[in-house]
Image: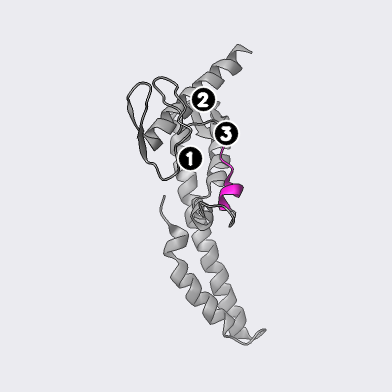
Amino acid sequence: MPNYYTNSLTRLAKLSFDASRTKKGSKNSIKAYNKLRKYHAHVANQKKDYLHKLSTSLANSYDYIFVEDLSIKSMERKDNSIKLGKYLNNRSYSMFLNFLQYKLEWRGKRLIKVDRYFPSSKLCHECGYKNDSLTLSTRSWVCPKCGNKHDRDINAAINIRNEGLRLLALNNSL
């Protein structure tokens, strides 16, 4: 996803600085704050436009989409060791999921969320071995049970797909 917010930080800082230097309540102050407000809206609209286009193309292409139900709030917290706050806000994951959800429903398709506590990256998709010693910095690992080498992200995607298919079969059988 393009980094609209991070790419515009310098311009936002300059507009904010210019607005703060004006005398409060003056016509120049009103103009400066309107300019800042419009630029914030422009950046937000760029992001929304991209998310709408991406969710539409995915909704047109697939009947079922499986996603991990992540807790973005806990990842954004300052006391979290990962420190992904601004990065995650720039990505707007929950807004994207909302767009995707309603567009899939319009088309009679489904978005299936895999539980956030499902060990998608720690589980070997070949034999089912769970590697509890895996840390976030480890990008690839070898399964001690079957010997397969796994890229963390690809392995997680395969596990999310498999769990989503299992949940789909479970829901259809009820």
Q: Which mark lies nearer to you, 2 or 3?
A: 3
Identify the disc placed on residue 55: 1
Picture disc at residue 117: 3
Front residue of this view, candidates 63 and 75: 75
Q: Which of 163 and 108 is in front in this view?
A: 163
Stretch of the chain drawn in magenta: 69-76
For marks 3 and 1, the one nearer the N-term is 1
Seen at 51% across and 67% down, the residue is 39
Mark 2 touching mark 1, by CB under 8 A? no
The kind of secondary structure element at disc 1 is helix
Quick check: marks 3 and 1 in contact, CB under 8 Å?
no
Image height of 42 relative to 148, above or below: below
Task: Evaluate whether residue 61 shows in this view.
Answer: no
Task: Tell me which secondary structure the magenta stretch mostly adopts.
Answer: helix
Residue 128 has which mark?
Answer: none
Residue 75 on the magenta span: yes
Label 2 SS? helix
- For marks 2 and 1, the one nearer the N-term is 1
Q: Is residue 87 above or below residue 172?
A: below
Total marks shown come to 3
**Which numbered tag is attached to residue 164?**
2
Position of residue 152 measured from the top left corner of the image (x, y, whole percent): 39, 36
